[in-house]
Amino acid sequence: MKKKIISFERNEVFEEFILSKIDAEIYYLEEKSSDNKLINKILRFCLYLKLFYLLYFVKIDLIISTVYNSHLISKLISIFPKKIFIIIQHYISLEFELKRLKKLNLGIFLCFGDRQKNSFLKFNHNIDQCKTVGSLIYSAYRKSNVKIKNPKIKICYISQWTPSNLKSLKGHKFINENYNRENDIETMIEIEKNLLRYLKKYNYDYKIALREKEKSEEFDYFKSIFDEKNLNIRKNSFDTYKLMDNSEVVITWSSTCGYEIFADNKKVLFIPYQNKEFKIFQNETCVLEEKNFEAFEKKLNNIINMSNESYENLTLKDQNSIIDKFNLKSTDSLITEQINRHL
């Protein structure tokens, strides 16, 4: 009899590179939300009904989630301690996030690398087993895309302007008792001011990698600052990776894709400025803490003028702590192995 799996959320990379290779019947569940509290309760109730039906009448063998920070998943792991849950990390977590989150139950947790594993354990999140497997999206991308040896673009800046951040920027109150977005917004504005000044001085080719897949508020925001022809709307899951691959240097505040490609020795400049909560590690070569333009200019020029070999020598320890080199291309195999082991 075919094994049966519940998969929370629809993720095209996960479905293509993992689930399509698993000999099992897949039932998809998705946690939906609304601004209306009553509708939210109804949606949650319907999800619970469907879940309980599957668990008690269909006899599910394994539950997988690519949304690791969901309190719903944590609650389910507590309610069904005998069920096997595999939780797959899909983005980098900063320590301030892990600190403010209610304690998570993560079952069998497949995370990026040692630094992330240690952060989760530091804040006492419950993990039955923790395996470092790397990033599924980056691994899938790298398997089918050879590294570009001679990038055509000098600088790629990764946008982190989410709809919530843009809403806060416009003066609308962002309601979350555990988190204030002022530091996010201030940091991004300062980075973009310094980047604009730098580009005017050096006239380098550049691209802004947008998050959204269509012309939205994010597009309009960047259009008001940078040249529209340099704004790159994300077309698919791999589009931003291709753009970074074709750039000599990537600049980011704390983007997951920036950390992923950094682990593969792409020259990346991380700019948390003086906010320690946004730093994953300290490294004079690739982390900028001073806000003034002169420091920005000096640090970026140093990275641009540095060879890839020199950059790797100075950052290798931190690269490996994000994702072990062995796991850069083998994440899908490692995840598939874990799923088959528990079916």
Image (tube, rainbow, N blue to C red):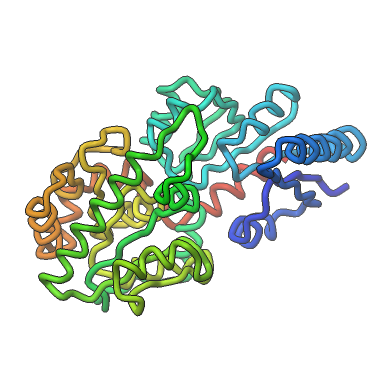
In what quadrant of the picture does the C terminus appear?
Answer: top right
User: Horizontal and vertical percent for residue 30?
Assistant: 72, 47
Farthest residue in the front direction? 171
Question: Residue 154: percent from the left, percent from the top?
Answer: 22, 72
Please say if 124 is above or below 291: above
Horizontal side, residue 78 vs residue 178: left or right: right
Q: Is residue 34 found left or right of 4 in the rendered image?
A: left
Q: Residue at x 35, y 59 (%)?
A: 158
Q: Is residue 21 left or right of residue 137?
A: right
Please tell me which residue is depicted at 35% across the width and 57% down the height of the picture: 261
In the rendered image, the residue lying farthest to the top is 124
Query: Which residue of the protein is positioned furthest toward the right in this rendering?
Result: 57
**Front residue of this view, candidates 193 and 306:** 193
Residue at the image position 74 percent from the left and 22 percent from the top = 79
Residue at point 76%, 36% (across, down): 38
User: Where is residue 11 shown, x and y percent of the image?
Assistant: 63, 56
Q: Is residue 276 left or right of residue 86?
A: left
Q: Position of residue 282 (x, y in %)?
A: 21, 38
> Front-most of 78 and 225?
225
Q: How many marks?
A: 0
The vertical placement of 227 against 92, above or below, is below
Q: Nearer the viewer, residue 180 or 153?
A: 180
Task: Specify the quadrant of the image occupied by residue 246.
Answer: bottom left
